[in-house]
Image (tube, rainbow, N blue to C red):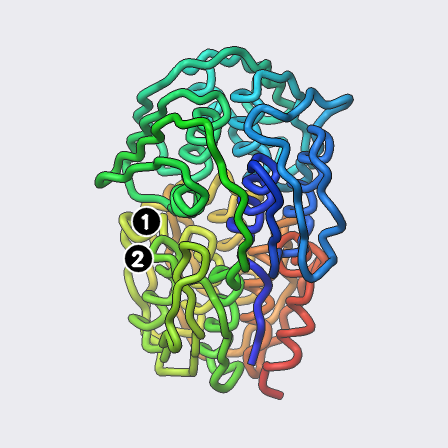
Amino acid sequence: MIVVPGDKSISHRALMFAALGGGRSRVRGLLRSADVHSTAGVLRALGVAIPDLDAPEVAVTGVGLRGLRAPAGALDCGNSGTTTRLMAGVVAGAGVTARFEGDASLSKRPMRRVARPLEAMGARIELPPHGGLPMTVHGAPLHGVTWHSEVASAQVKSALLLAGLVADVPVEVHEPAATRDHTERMLRARGVDVRTEELAVTLVPGGRLDALDMDVPGDPSSAAFFAGLAAIGAAREVAMPNVGINPGRIGAFAVLRRMGAQVRFDDAAEQGGEPVATVVAAPGTLRGTVIAPEEVPSLIDELPLLACVAARAEGETRVTGAEELRVKESDRIAAVVANLRAVGVDAEELPDGFVVRGSDRPLAGRVTTHLDHRIAMAFGVLGAAAGNAITIDDPSVCAVSYPAFWDDLARVRLG
């Protein structure tokens, strides 16, 4: 059995909503990763007393929707795009001014996608010519907005909803495709009027965000790596209890099933507005598949893993509509293909995806992670398969989302 760490997306939001709530919230099962520590640090800089995240239960007394103060220095977001984009919405709504900074990888990631709609609400935002960090958000009295997003991005959607929540103005966001709905679910559970109709989400102002105790479910993105490990036969049946199975997050499990792996959800329940279950995965005879653009939002973070699983499947796997991978922690399309080739896999880069042709021959070589945790973990799974000899250049980057990944991998892998 593997107990995967708390969901990263929900951990970020649990801290933010506790900080902005009207009272004391207790959060259990919080992910203790570098990214979540970045969110905690940003909230502390804005005047919220966030305790040590290493405690089993983190209790936060919220400052309320209008209780944030301007920071004394820059807000260090580390490697976390979620921290940067969601807190940009919070800062804009709060009417304070803050400069957002990050590491070399985060500084290259696109921020105009969140700056433009916040500017449409009345905020003033300064960006460097390349459109990344540092970004300075000058809060101002905001007005409501109806925004038609050009990219399917839960972070952009969430930033606008949080800006509207804190500023107490209406927000309506239309997306080109469905994205993760953690923000909507968690806001509703805390008394906020958020309405969803097909690809549109509306926040009705009401000036409240209730305190709420919650248990953070296990991260399905983290669980997917061990499902992939079992799928390629590098582990026997693996059971992972209390994993989030939000419909917007389980596309990778559906693809693994389609490829021939055995994946099921046992003991399904609901926890704090989020569905959870024990995810059980076991080996199967793998076949290549086609991952279509409409599937991509539900498995965007797992595509490096699925590429590595495809390297051990019979036939060809093709992914399209995933151009968003080019602006993650690394250019994940280029990184995945280059690293697959480096270890002996027949792989081809597409403008918006990749093609992987699987085989059962031994694989060997050195993987360059580009400081990207998903690349390190995906190739760690592939390297665990019998007969493979794959070296990861920087295993420590896994701490961004899964600090104990290598220990858990060593515990369940065969051999």
Is residue 330 in sight in this rendering?
A: no
Q: Quadrant of residue 138?
A: top right
Residue at coordinates 56% horizontally, 81% vertically from top-left?
1
Q: Are marks 2 and 1 in contact (CB under 8 Å)?
A: yes
**What kind of residue is marked 1?**
Thr
**What kind of residue is marked 2?**
Ile
354 on left or right of 112: left
**Nearer to us in this view, 383 or 220:** 220
Residue lying farthest to the front in this orientation? 23
177 on left or right of 401: left
Q: How many marks?
A: 2
Q: Would you name the residue on which mark 1 appears?
A: 320
**Nearer to us in this view, 405 or 199:** 199
Q: Secondary structure at mark 2?
A: strand
The disc at residue 148 is none
Crowding around mark 2 (Cα neighbors within 10 Å: few <14, some 14 to 19, many 20+) is: many
**Nearer to us in this view, 388 or 218:** 218
Q: Quadrant of residue 357?
A: bottom left
Q: Position of residue 330 (x, y in %)?
A: 56, 44
Q: Would you name the residue on which mark 2 appears?
A: 291
Is residue 383 in sight in this rendering?
A: yes
Q: Secondary structure at mark 1?
A: loop
| Residue 94 versus residue 200 in the image, above or below | above
| Residue 279 versus residue 80 in the image, above or below | below
Q: Disc 2 to disc 1, how far (Cα)?
A: 7 Å
Q: Earlier in the sequence, mark 2 or mark 1?
A: 2
